[in-house]
Amino acid sequence: MMQIEGTITTVHDNARCVAAALAPDNLRNMDTKAEGDRVITTIMGTQLRSVIASMDDYLMNLAIAEDACSVRKNGNNP
C-alpha cells in the first residue's frame, strides 16, 4: 500500500505556543513540533483524499492557534 506524506512548515513569533495549541487536535497520523521560529507538521496516510482533508483541517486550526497565541503574547483579552 502506498504511503502519502505531506509536510507544512510555517513561521511564527511564538512557535512553541502555536505547536502546543495545535497538539490536542492532532490525529494519530499527524506530528507537530516547534523548531526555533517554525512549526513543522507532517501528515501521513494511505489515501490522498484523507491526507488533503487533514491538511485542510490543520490549516483552519493553525489560524485559530496563531490568533490565540497572538492574543496571549500581546496580553489582550478577546
Image: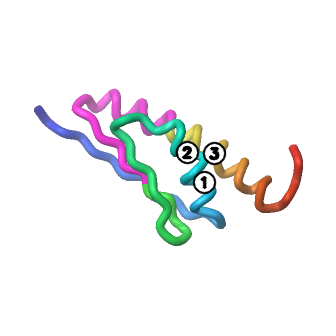
Q: Is residue 36 magenta?
A: no
Q: Nearer the viewer, residue 60 or 41?
A: 41
Q: Which mark is residue 22?
A: 2
- Read off the residue under disc 3: 63
**What residue is rendered at 22% in x and 32% in y?**
46
Residue 5, position as x, y percentages in the image:
28, 45
- Could you tell me which secondary element the residue under label 1 belongs to? helix
Label 3 near label 2: C-beta < 8 Å?
no
* Range shown magenta: 41-57
Q: Is residue 46 magenta?
A: yes
Judge depth for marks 2 and 3 and give the one in front: 2
Q: How is the image coloured?
A: rainbow
Q: Residues within 10 Å of mark 2 (few under 14, many from 20)?
A: many
Residue farthest to the bottom?
Answer: 36
Q: Nearer the viewer, residue 63 or 69?
A: 69
- Read off the residue under disc 1: 18
Q: Quadrant of the C terminus?
A: top right
Using the image, determine if residue 26 lies above or below residue 15: above
Mark before the other along the chain sequence, 2 or 3: 2
